[in-house]
Image (cartoon, grey):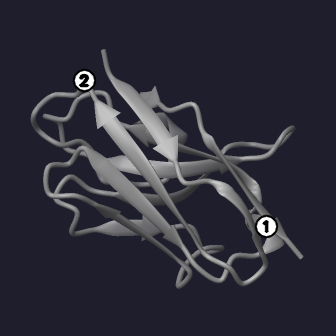
Amino acid sequence: QVRLVESGGGSVPAGGSLSLACEISGYTRTRGCVAWFRQNAGQEREGVAGIDKSGDRATYADSVKGRFTITRDNAGNRVYLQMDSLKPDDTAMYYCAVVRYSGLWCGGGLSRAEYYYWGQGTQVTVSS
């Protein structure tokens, strides 16, 4: 059974930093594309950052470019989101997600439809 667990959320003042981690278990040996999404109550879940299988290519939403960095470890079991220069607009529940079949090609984009397994989320709150 595939399971994703996010950690690292918290409350910081504007301009601060947080580092989120997503631990993936029960997945196949090969690595699949992973992405971070965020959502506030009553709003659509939006893609924030995605990373391909190799970890060489990352995709970012315009709103976080230059401030967030997505990486993954060599084993592929953990994916990280380093968030710097945080703004109050970054406040949301953050979720990580992985594609269903690691053996297929994936782009590591920011479309919800690309991802199948999801974590329970970790809350990030940025105060002004």
Specify whether 85 is left or right of 52: right
Q: Residue at x 58, y 79 (%)?
A: 84
Outermost residue toward the top in this view = 1
The quarter holding residue 99 reads top left
**What is the secondary structure assignment of the residue under circle 2?**
loop
Instruction: Compare marks 2 and 1 and give the one earlier in the sequence.
Output: 2
The quarter in which the N terminus is drawn is top left
- Please, what is the three-letter code of the amino acid marked with disc 1? Val
Q: Quadrant of residue 61?
A: bottom right
In this view, the residue in front, 98 or 87, is 87
Q: In this orientation, which residue lies closer to the viewer: 22 or 37?
A: 22
Where residue 9 appears, as percent x and y from the top left, is: 62, 53
Does residue 78 appear to the left or right of 102 in the view shown?
A: right
- Residue 64's place in the image compared with 55, above or below, is below
| Residue 88 visible in the current orientation | yes
The percent position of residue 87, horizontal first and vertical second, equals 76, 75
User: Measuring 36% from the left and 47% from the top, which residue is drawn there?
Assistant: 34
Q: Residues within 10 Å of mark 2 (few under 14, many from 20)?
A: few
Say what amino acid the circle numbered 2 marks.
Gly
Q: Position of residue 54 (x, y in %)?
A: 16, 59
Q: What label does residue 97 carry, if any? A: none
Q: Which residue is mark 2?
A: 26
The image quadrant of residue 73 is bottom left
User: How far is mark 2 from mark 1, CA to CA?
Assistant: 33 Å
Q: Are marks 2 and 1 in contact (CB under 8 Å)?
A: no
At label 1, counting other C-alpha atoms closer than 10 Å, the crowd grade (few under 14, some 14-19, many 20 or more) is many
Marks counted in the figure total 2
Tell me the residue at 89%/76% (across/down). Answer: 128
- The residue tagged 1 is 126
Q: Residue furthest left?
A: 29
